[in-house]
Amino acid sequence: MDMENLMTVAAQLQAKVASAQEELAHTSVKGIAGGGACIIEMSGKYDLLNLMLRPDAVNGDAAAITKLVMDAYNDAKAKADAKIDMVMGAATAGMPMPM
C-alpha cells in the first residue's frame, strides 16, 4: 500500500470513527436493578444522564441503596460497552489495515 493510499484510508477511518463517536454521544442506555427499583441512564460515552430510585427503594438502608445503584450502573455500563463495540465495529468494518 503506497503512502498516498494509506493517508486516504486513514482519513476515511478518522471520519468514520468521529461519526461513530458522535452517534455514541447521542445514544442512551438504561441499567436496571432491583426489578426497576433503581434505573441509571447513561450515554454511549458513559456520561450519567439520569438516576431514578423508586420511593420504596429509598426506605432501605444505605448499604442496600448503594448496592442497587452499583448494580444498575454495572448493567448500564455493560449495555454501553456492547453498543460501543457494535458502533465502532461498524465504523471500522471493511477498512484495510496496513501491515
Image: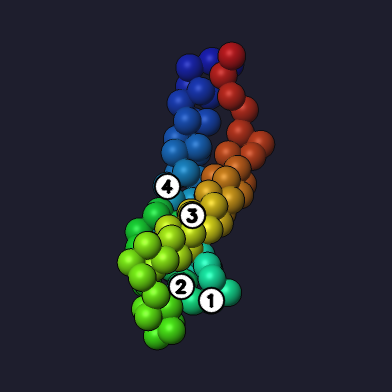
Q: Residue at x 52, y 67 (%)?
A: 33
| Front residue of this view, candidates 99 and 46 | 46
User: Tag 4's secondary structure?
Assistant: helix
In what element is the residue under mark 3? Answer: helix
Query: Furthest residue to the bottom?
Result: 55
> How is this picture coloured?
rainbow
Marks 2 & 4, CB-CB < 8 Å contact: no
Dot 2 and dot 3 residues touching (CB under 8 Å): no
Type of amino acid at the residue the image marks with label 4: Ala
Q: Pointer 3: what residue?
A: 74
Q: SS of the residue at dot 2? A: strand
Cα–Cα gap, marks 2 and 4: 33 Å
In-image side of 99 versus 7 (left or right): right
**Residue that badge 4 annotates:** 18
Tell me how far mark 2 sits from mark 1, CA to CA: 5 Å
Tell me the quadrant of the picture where the C terminus can be found. top right
User: Looking at the image, is mark 2 or mark 3 earlier in the sequence?
Assistant: 2
Residue 91 shows in the view: no
| Mark 3 vs 4, N-terminal side | 4
The structure residue drawn at horizontal position 37% and vertical position 62%, both measured from the top left corner, is 63
Task: Verify CB contact (< 8 Å) between mark 2 and mark 1.
Answer: yes
Q: Mark 1 points at which residue?
A: 36
Label 1 crowd bin: few (<14), some (14–19), many (20+), radius 10 Å: some
- Name the spot of residue 59 as percent of width and height, x first: 37, 80
Badge 3 crowding class, 10 Å Cα cut-off, few under 14, some 14 to 19, many 20 or more, is some
Residue 38's mark? Answer: 2
Judge whether residue 57 can be spotted in this image. Answer: yes
Which of discs 2 and 4 lies nearer the camera? The answer is: 2
- Tell me the CA gap for discs 4 and 1: 34 Å
